[in-house]
Image (cartoon, grey):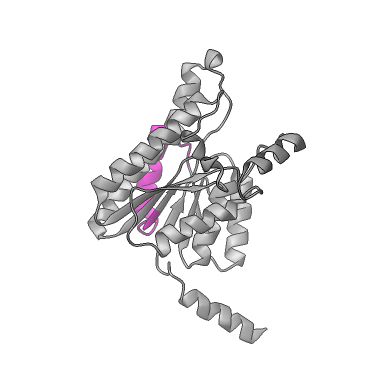
Amino acid sequence: MLALAKIKDCRRLMTKLKDKVALVTGGARRVGRAIAKRLGEEGAEVILHYHSSQQEAVAALREFQEAQIATRLIQANLADAVEVRQMLDRLEAEFPPVDILVNSASVYYGTPLEECTLDHWENTLNTNLRAPFQLAQRLGLLMKHRGSGDILNIVDCAIRRPYKGFAPYLMSKAALMSMTEVLALELAPEVRVNAIAPGTVLLPENTSEEVRQQTIRRAPLKRLGVPEDVADMACYLVSHSQFMTGGYYAVDGGAGIR
């Protein structure tokens, strides 16, 4: 057991992201949590952002620390621009400089066009677009000043094949993709900015078995994805690739080509 522990310690010393600090928004749950864990396994110190998922955030903190991943928590409501600014102030004052920003947090709920209100629009766009811009602008410029950094925006493969009933959500993710390309130009060459577009890696909890099987049949790879598939792509973009920026990378089992 002692020898195994030493091997694990040696592997950690050899990891790609040693001495890097990664901020993952929405890092307490689902895809954000998987990305944060994967980056931590590669040696990064992880800052998990959460809004209302305190119980999940504390559970993730304990899990990561047990796996010898240096982890800290930070809380903010990303729909509130003032809270985002306060979070950025706290990051600069109390945390080490951020080398990797993952904009994973988002809101996703159905809004049929005839029922869509200004409140729906503002809450969705503020969380899914304005907050990522606030974070990427301030942290990205700090990265550029220091000479290196990575920003990953989690979009959605449905921005290229939209479906009905989710207009504010899909428009916010399409705009986030556009922001990815713009910031890739603005922050180059020091900072690389890329977008990951998950497909069906997690179906809604109330999805019927019939819909689940239909989704599987439509996918060329004939299976659903898992959050770890997205996490693997995130890890590749920030730790292995040095010549990719402004890109769109679908993790959808090939559904986008059908």
* Residue 220, above or below 242: above
| Residue 218: quarter of image | top right
Query: Is residue 88 found inside the magenta-colored segment of the image?
Result: yes
Specify the quadrant of the image occupied by residue 205: top right
Can the viewer see residue 29? no
| Camera-nearest residue between 47 and 18 | 18
The percent position of residue 36, horizontal first and vertical second, equals: 52, 56
Name the residue nearer the viewer: 147 or 189: 189
The image shows residue 229 at horizontal and vertical percentages of 56, 54
Quadrant location, the N terminus:
bottom right
Residue sitting at the far top: 114
The picture places residue 117, in percent across and down from the top left corner, at 50, 16
Q: Which region of the structure is painted magenta?
A: 76-100
In this rendered view, identify the residue nearer to me: 243 or 75: 243
Q: Residue at x 57, y 83 (%)?
A: 6
Instruction: Specify whether residue 67 is in view.
Output: yes
Residue 97 belongs to the span the image colors magenta: yes
Q: Whole-percent x and y of residue 86? A: 38, 41
Residue furthest to the right:
209
Residue at the image point whose x is 60% and y is 67% from the top:
67
Left or right: 117 as drawn, with respect to 201:
left
Residue at image coords 55%, 28%: 163
